[in-house]
Amino acid sequence: MGLEHADDAGVFRISDELALVQTLDFFTPIVDDPYTFGLIAAANALSDVYAMGGRPLTAMNIVAFPIDTMDISVLTEILAGGLEKLKEANVALVGGHSVSDSELKYGMSITGVVHPQRVLTNLGARPGDALVLTKPLGTGIMGTAIKAELADPAVVQRVEVSMAMLNRAAAEIAAGFPLHACTDVTGFGLLGHGCEMTCGAGLGLLVRGSALPIFPEMAGYADIGLLPAGLSRNRDHWARNLEISTGVARHLVDAVCDPQTSGGLLLAIDGAEADRLVDELRRAGVAAASRVAEVVADTEERFVLLP
């Protein structure tokens, strides 16, 4: 599996007992500190393997660096951050490739393994399922505020810690539950990745705005217009599916459309098991874990945002 349904990674079966999970991701800096950028980029790349139910094993660096205009010490710090996150994930760095470029970019190609019968995809949700989200929304809006130098150091640190947090613990806890589908919430936001779970399946989502985990400062930043360009693109692209109920605060609409960097897992599980999953995740340190949506039969495949 790979491109057919916009899954998070490619999966190639080697035998009845073993399949490879392969992905890559890289992007321009989203924080000022090079070491922290390395941490976040690595966590983001690893997340796709966790989202497929896999265990990452090896990584290769992908680097574009403006060697003529930027001190090499910046790259050294970025690579050190990436390596530190790989060590935390128990993943081996086995190589990589670099090019000279006018714009700094960094990320990784990750290879993992999974049992062919335990692969998770973004399809498979059923009516009566609930969706559980494991990280707060709003990294795009928060990042815009950080770039505008309107966020104080404590806020910056909290956002950076969230983005650098591995989805490993969430994936390991979730593996003990009968999941029906999984994805990670990244550039398409909760709206886009939620709709990917329902498109073509005759399903809809009832999303409870009050249950969404968001950064506390996000609403204020959104209200003064600190919105990333990707947020509007997401809302426009999925406009056919999005239905906003009366009484929904504007910042909650922004939150579901906001493009995420290194966001949380979005887990589809029978509604009767969802609260137990949330409890287990929180006990394991996944503090933001929340039951955010219910899956219903809906031929129009609507993403209904409720207050």
Image (cartoon, rainbow, N blue to C red):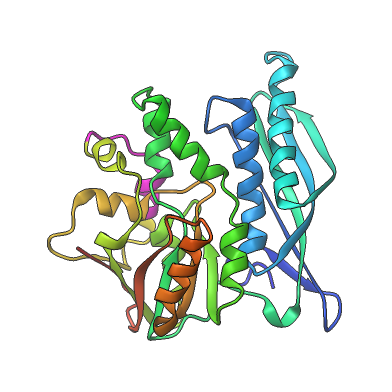
In the picture, the quarter occupied by the N terminus is bottom right
x, y percent for residue 148: 37, 24
Residue at (25% x, 48% y) in the render = 251
In the picture, which quadrant includes the C terminus? bottom left
Q: Is 163 situated left or right of 102 in this image?
A: left
Q: Is residue 123 visible?
A: no
Q: Is residue 55 left or right of residue 33?
A: right
Q: Is residue 78 visible?
A: yes
Question: What residue is rendered at 42% in x and 42% in y?
Answer: 140
**Residue 74 occupies quadrant:** top right
Q: Does 198 appear above or below 102? A: below
Front residue of this view, candidates 268 and 11: 268
Q: Does the stretch in magenta take in 86?
A: no
Q: Position of residue 122 (x, y in %)?
A: 54, 72
- Judge left or right: residue 307 versus residue 23: left
- Furthest-front residue in view? 283
Report the residue that reaches farthest toward the left.
247
Residue 215 horizontal side relative to residue 27, left or right: left
Residue 57 vs 293, above or below: the answer is above
Q: In the rendered image of this protein, does residue 246 appear above or below residue 160?
A: below
Please name whichever residue, 101 or 60, is drawn nearer the observer in this view of the structure.
Answer: 60
Q: Residue at x 54, y 25 (%)?
A: 32
Q: From what the image shows, is residue 237 above or below residue 42?
A: below
Residue at image position (39%, 82%) is: 271
- Residue 205 place in picture, x, y as percent: 34, 74
- Boundaries of the magenta span: 224-235
The answer to which image quadrant residue 242 occupies is bottom left
Residue 226 part of the magenta segment = yes
Point out residue 62 in the picture as x, y percentages from the top left corner.
Answer: 74, 40
| Number of marks | 0
Residue placed most toward the observer, 70 or 283: 283
Quadrant for residue 3, please give it. Answer: bottom right
